[in-house]
Image: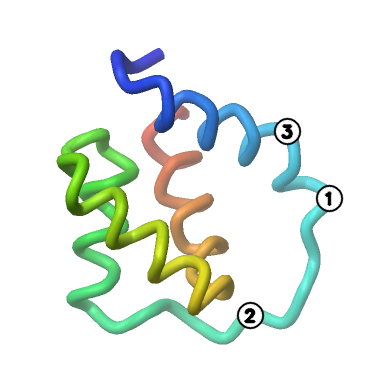
Amino acid sequence: MSTDPDFDILTSFLRRMMPDVEGHDLGDPAADICARLDRFAAGQADGKERAALSQLLKEHPEYIRYLGRAIRGRAE
Protein backbone atom coordinates (compact mmCIF):
# COMPACT_ATOMS: atom_id res chain seq x y z
CA MET A 1 0.00 0.00 0.00
CA SER A 2 1.06 3.57 -0.64
CA THR A 3 1.28 6.37 1.89
CA ASP A 4 -1.64 8.21 0.25
CA PRO A 5 -4.98 7.12 1.77
CA ASP A 6 -6.99 8.49 -1.20
CA PHE A 7 -4.93 6.43 -3.61
CA ASP A 8 -5.31 3.32 -1.42
CA ILE A 9 -9.09 3.73 -1.30
CA LEU A 10 -9.32 4.04 -5.09
CA THR A 11 -7.01 1.09 -5.64
CA SER A 12 -8.99 -1.09 -3.25
CA PHE A 13 -12.27 -0.10 -4.91
CA LEU A 14 -10.97 -0.85 -8.40
CA ARG A 15 -9.59 -4.23 -7.36
CA ARG A 16 -12.97 -5.22 -5.93
CA MET A 17 -15.13 -3.84 -8.73
CA MET A 18 -13.17 -4.35 -11.95
CA PRO A 19 -14.40 -7.91 -12.59
CA ASP A 20 -18.01 -6.67 -12.39
CA VAL A 21 -17.61 -3.59 -14.56
CA GLU A 22 -18.80 -3.98 -18.14
CA GLY A 23 -19.38 -1.52 -20.88
CA HIS A 24 -18.41 -0.30 -24.29
CA ASP A 25 -14.72 0.47 -24.62
CA LEU A 26 -14.24 3.91 -26.14
CA GLY A 27 -10.51 3.38 -26.46
CA ASP A 28 -7.74 5.03 -24.51
CA PRO A 29 -7.78 8.75 -23.72
CA ALA A 30 -5.47 11.14 -25.56
CA ALA A 31 -1.75 10.70 -24.87
CA ASP A 32 -1.53 13.72 -22.55
CA ILE A 33 -4.44 12.43 -20.46
CA CYS A 34 -2.89 8.95 -20.34
CA ALA A 35 0.33 10.47 -19.02
CA ARG A 36 -1.58 12.28 -16.25
CA LEU A 37 -3.52 9.13 -15.34
CA ASP A 38 -0.31 7.08 -15.33
CA ARG A 39 1.25 9.57 -12.89
CA PHE A 40 -1.81 9.22 -10.68
CA ALA A 41 -1.69 5.41 -10.87
CA ALA A 42 1.97 5.52 -9.86
CA GLY A 43 1.16 7.68 -6.83
CA GLN A 44 3.16 10.59 -8.26
CA ALA A 45 0.34 13.13 -8.61
CA ASP A 46 0.33 15.97 -6.09
CA GLY A 47 -2.83 17.19 -4.37
CA LYS A 48 -3.61 19.80 -7.02
CA GLU A 49 -3.21 17.27 -9.83
CA ARG A 50 -5.34 14.67 -7.98
CA ALA A 51 -8.12 17.24 -7.59
CA ALA A 52 -7.95 18.12 -11.29
CA LEU A 53 -8.01 14.44 -12.25
CA SER A 54 -10.97 13.84 -9.97
CA GLN A 55 -12.90 16.51 -11.84
CA LEU A 56 -11.72 15.12 -15.19
CA LEU A 57 -12.93 11.63 -14.23
CA LYS A 58 -16.33 13.06 -13.25
CA GLU A 59 -16.58 14.67 -16.67
CA HIS A 60 -15.18 11.64 -18.52
CA PRO A 61 -16.05 8.46 -16.58
CA GLU A 62 -14.87 6.42 -19.57
CA TYR A 63 -11.30 7.25 -18.49
CA ILE A 64 -11.78 5.18 -15.32
CA ARG A 65 -11.29 2.02 -17.37
CA TYR A 66 -7.83 3.20 -18.44
CA LEU A 67 -6.99 4.24 -14.88
CA GLY A 68 -8.10 0.85 -13.58
CA ARG A 69 -5.85 -0.94 -16.06
CA ALA A 70 -2.94 1.33 -15.12
CA ILE A 71 -3.41 0.66 -11.40
CA ARG A 72 -3.90 -3.06 -11.92
CA GLY A 73 -0.75 -3.21 -14.07
CA ARG A 74 1.28 -1.59 -11.29
CA ALA A 75 -0.18 -3.94 -8.65
CA GLU A 76 0.73 -7.13 -10.53
Q: Does dot 3 land on a helix, a strand or a loop? A: helix
Task: Tell me: 38 left or right of 69.
Answer: left
In the picture shown, does residue 4 fall above or below 68?
A: above
Task: Tell me: 41 left or right of 67.
Answer: left
Question: How far apart are the two marked residues, 2 and 3, measured between alpha carbons?
Answer: 20 Å
Name the colour scheme.
rainbow
Labelled disc at residue 25: 2
In the picture shown, does residue 55 fall above or below 72?
A: below
Q: In the rendering, at what x and y percent does residue 65 appear?
A: 56, 63
Contact, mark 2 vs mark 3 (Cβ under 8 Å): no
Quadrant, the N terminus? top left
How crowded pointer 3 is (Cα within 10 Å; few <14, some 14-19, many 20+) is rated as few
Closer to the camera, 62 or 25? 62
How crowded pointer 1 is (Cα within 10 Å; few <14, some 14-19, many 20+) is rated as few
Q: Given the image, on which type of amino acid does mark 2 rest?
A: Asp
- Which residue position is annotated with label 1? 20
Task: Tell me: 59 left or right of 14.
Answer: left
Q: Does dot 1 land on a helix, a strand or a loop? A: helix
Contact, mark 2 vs mark 1 (Cβ under 8 Å): no
Q: Does dot 2 land on a helix, a strand or a loop? A: loop
Q: In the rendering, at what x and y percent does residue 18 appear?
A: 70, 47
User: Could you tell me which residue is drawn at 77 percent across and 74 percent down?
Assistant: 23
User: Could you tell me which residue is drawn at 27 percent across and 53 percent down?
Assistant: 38
- Which residue position is annotated with label 3? 16
Question: How far apart are the two marked residues, 2 and 1, measured between alpha carbons?
Answer: 15 Å
- Return the disc, 2 or 1, that comes first in the chain's sequence: 1
Q: For the residues carrying marks 2 and 3, which lies nearer the camera in this image?
A: 3
Labelled disc at residue 48: none
Q: Given the image, on which type of amino acid does mark 3 rest?
A: Arg
User: Could you tell me which residue is drawn at 29 percent across and 83 percent down?
Assistant: 30
Task: Tell me: 19 left or right of 60.
Answer: right
Q: Given the image, on which type of amino acid does mark 1 rest?
A: Asp
